[in-house]
Image (cartoon, grey):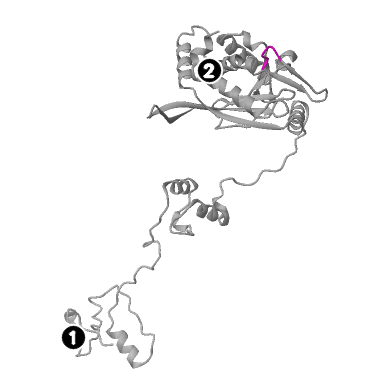
């Protein structure tokens, strides 16, 4: 190869009639570029390499510079929280999905958020936890459960509760539970098969004239069910005070034996954790258990208009040996009418 003098660096050798690329110009003009040595030792290869100008290598196709990463905002947010560079994730389709992130986590141990596994531990089931386990097992073994769920519009009931709280004075703040208890107690006289106990060994059903309502309460020791005796005889403020007192007694282990027995129907409420629906387990030998779920705001159609309403689902599990499906549904509908027309709660 013949080098061109610096003062001749601007000259370009024009090719003969055969269209060949311009020859390489001198190093004074092209300093810093790396030359390519011809790989073919033949004369044709050498002359072709000498005549071809050096150009920068194009970025690799499909490399990070040219790859457009497609992923939904949810996938991007999850990857960000996990510290994953989406450019390192292989997509099965046209975009990165959660399944692709799962596969990436499976084969890249360093991204696991759970850390090392904890050692196994064995816990002896004794005391209250053992009694709970035995009762739940007996209930599911002996009782053919069925569950019915209905949707309640509690917008008016919540407005009533707000008004009562504004004028409560020194009384404890009302939750929705005492108002639901009033509705249940008012509906039960027409459905005595709900407020009953079944002795399946003696084949005797006892329908209770009074409402002794069990209130499922979670404690550190496990689930306990203190009882509001004669709930039908108490007003909303008395019910609120009794719910609070019994729950506190159960949590602190101060509940008396008579406060933990004798229930004819149970109400199980998880409050804000209530979920959308539940299939509660009956507190044997009772024949039914009610479970109000959490209140959520949702758009509904009323009189042809879309409005925001406060909606709550009510679940009931019944013993199908004693309670027919029609009776359970009719009872839940009767409670619904009272809940959605709260003025009826205070009408004798």
Answer few, some or many: residues within 10 Å of disc 2's Cα (few below 14, many 20 plus, some between 14 and 19): many
Q: Nearer the viewer, residue 230 or 325?
A: 325
Answer few, some or many: residues within 10 Å of disc 1's Cα (few below 14, many 20 plus, some between 14 and 19): few
**Residue shown at the point (71%, 42%) measured from the top left:** 120
Q: Nearer the viewer, mark 1 or mark 2?
A: 2
Secondary structure character of the magenta stretch overall: loop
* Residue 210 is inside the magenta segment: yes
Between the residue at mark 1 and the residue at mark 2, the CA separation in whole angstroms equals: 99 Å
**Among the 4 quarters of the image, the one containing residue 307:** top left
Would residue 68 be found to the left or right of residue 325 on screen?
left
Q: Secondary structure at mark 1?
A: loop
Instruction: Indicate the quadrant containing the C terminus: top left, top right, bottom left or bottom right.
Output: top right
Percent of width and height locating residue 240: 57, 13
Would residue 83 be found to the left or right of residue 211 on screen?
left
Q: Up-down: is 206 above or below 18?
A: above
Residue identified by numbered label 2: 338
Is any atom of residue 155 visible in this view?
A: yes
Q: Nearer the viewer, residue 137 or 54?
A: 137
Residue identified by numbered label 1: 14
**Residue shown at the point (43%, 59%) measured from the top left:** 94
């Amino acid at each position: 190869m013949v080098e061109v003098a610096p003062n001749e660096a601007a000259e370009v050798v024009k090719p003969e009639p055969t269209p060949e690329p311009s020859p390489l110009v001198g190093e004074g003009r092209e300093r810093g570029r790396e030359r390519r040595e011809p790989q073919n030792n033949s004369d044709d290869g050498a002359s072709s390499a000498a005549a071809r100008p050096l150009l920068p290598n194009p970025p690799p196709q499909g490399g990070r510079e040219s790859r457009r990463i497609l992923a939904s905002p949810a996938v991007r947010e999850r990857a960000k929280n996990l510290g994953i560079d989406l450019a390192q994730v292989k997509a099965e389709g046209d975009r990165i999905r959660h399944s692709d992130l799962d596969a990436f986590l499976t084969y890249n141990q360093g991204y696991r958020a759970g850390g090392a596994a904890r050692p196994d531990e064995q816990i002896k089931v004794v005391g209250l936890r053992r009694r709970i386990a035995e009762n739940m097992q007996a209930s599911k073994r002996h009782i053919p459960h069925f569950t019915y769920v209905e949707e309640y519009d509690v917008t008016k009931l919540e407005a009533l509760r707000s008004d009562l709280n504004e004028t409560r004075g020194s009384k404890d703040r009302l939750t929705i539970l005492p108002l639901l208890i009033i509705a249940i107690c008012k509906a039960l006289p027409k459905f005595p098969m709900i407020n009953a106990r079944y002795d399946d060994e003696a084949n005797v059903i006892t329908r209770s004239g009074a409402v002794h309502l069990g209130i499922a309460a979670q404690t550190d020791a496990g689930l306990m069910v203190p009882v509001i005796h004669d709930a039908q005889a108490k007003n909303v403020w008395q019910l609120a005070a009794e719910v609070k007192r019994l729950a506190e007694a159960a949590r602190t282990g101060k509940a008396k034996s008579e406060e933990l027995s004798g229930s004819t129907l149970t109400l199980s409420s998880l409050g804000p954790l209530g979920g959308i629906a539940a299939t509660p387990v009956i507190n044997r030998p009772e024949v039914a258990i009610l479970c109000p779920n959490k209140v959520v705001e949702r758009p509904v159609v009323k009189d042809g208009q879309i409005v925001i309403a406060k909606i709550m689902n009510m679940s009931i599990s019944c013993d199908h040996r004693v309670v027919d499906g029609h009776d359970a549904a009719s009872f839940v509908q009767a409670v619904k009418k009272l809940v959605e027309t709260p003025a009826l709660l205070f009408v004798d």
